[in-house]
């Protein structure tokens, strides 16, 4: 389904970039590039670009989050003596795989 909307008259190329891509901080044809100093947001449906922040502790947060999920899974398996390959565990295994794969 295509949507058409009228453009303001007498737009230059840079004005058109700002008009079409300004909300998501992108430039270029089809809003294909992030503006300088910005990068794509990880879970954005419209691929919005946000300011790149220099966090030197980001990898620590990542490892803590991953180890928390893994530890929770192991505790559930040990406490409830669940067979990992049973059909009812497929949902939990899938959840752990999906949350782990989303942050690489």
Image: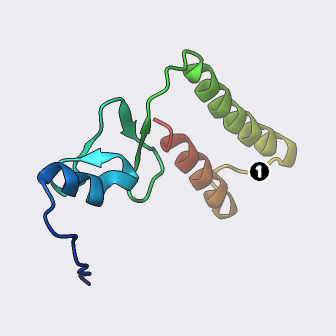
Task: Count residues near mark 1 (Cα–Cα under 10 Å), then give few for <14, some for 14-19, many for 20+.
Answer: few
Q: Residue furthest front?
A: 10
x, y percentage for residue 59? 55, 21
Q: Position of residue 8 (x, y in %)?
A: 22, 70
**Colour pattern:** rainbow
Q: Is residue 62 left or right of residue 16?
A: right
In which image quadrant can residue 35 be found? top left
Camera-nearest residue between 74 and 18: 18
Q: Residue at x 44, y 44 (%)?
A: 41
Quarter of the rendering occupied by the C terminus: top left
- Residue nearest the viewer, comparing 79 with 42: 42
Residue sitting farthest toward the right? 79
Residue 79 locus on image (x, y percent): 86, 43
Question: What residue is at 49 percent from the left and 44 percent from the top?
Answer: 102
The answer to whether 57 is drawn above or below residue 104 in the figure is above
- Residue at 62% across, 33% down: 66
Tell me which residue sits at (49%, 43%) in the image: 101
Residue 16 visible in the snapshot: yes
Q: Specify the quadrant that holds the N terminus.
A: bottom left
Residue 94 place in picture, x, y as percent: 57, 54
Position of 86 with respect to 53 (left or right) is right
Residue bearing the label numbered 1:
82
């Amino acid at each position: 389904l295509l949507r058409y909307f009228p453009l303001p008259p007498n737009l230059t190329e840079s004005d058109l970039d700002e008009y079409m891509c300004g909300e998501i901080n992108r430039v270029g044809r089809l809003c294909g590039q992030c503006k300088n100093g910005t990068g794509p947001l990880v879970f954005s449906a419209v691929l919005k670009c946000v300011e790149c922040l220099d966090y030197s502790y980001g990898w620590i947060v990542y490892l803590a989050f991953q180890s928390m999920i893994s530890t929770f899974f192991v505790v559930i398996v040990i406490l409830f003596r669940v067979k990992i390959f049973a059909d009812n565990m497929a949902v939990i295994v899938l959840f752990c795989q999906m949350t782990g794969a989303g942050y690489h």
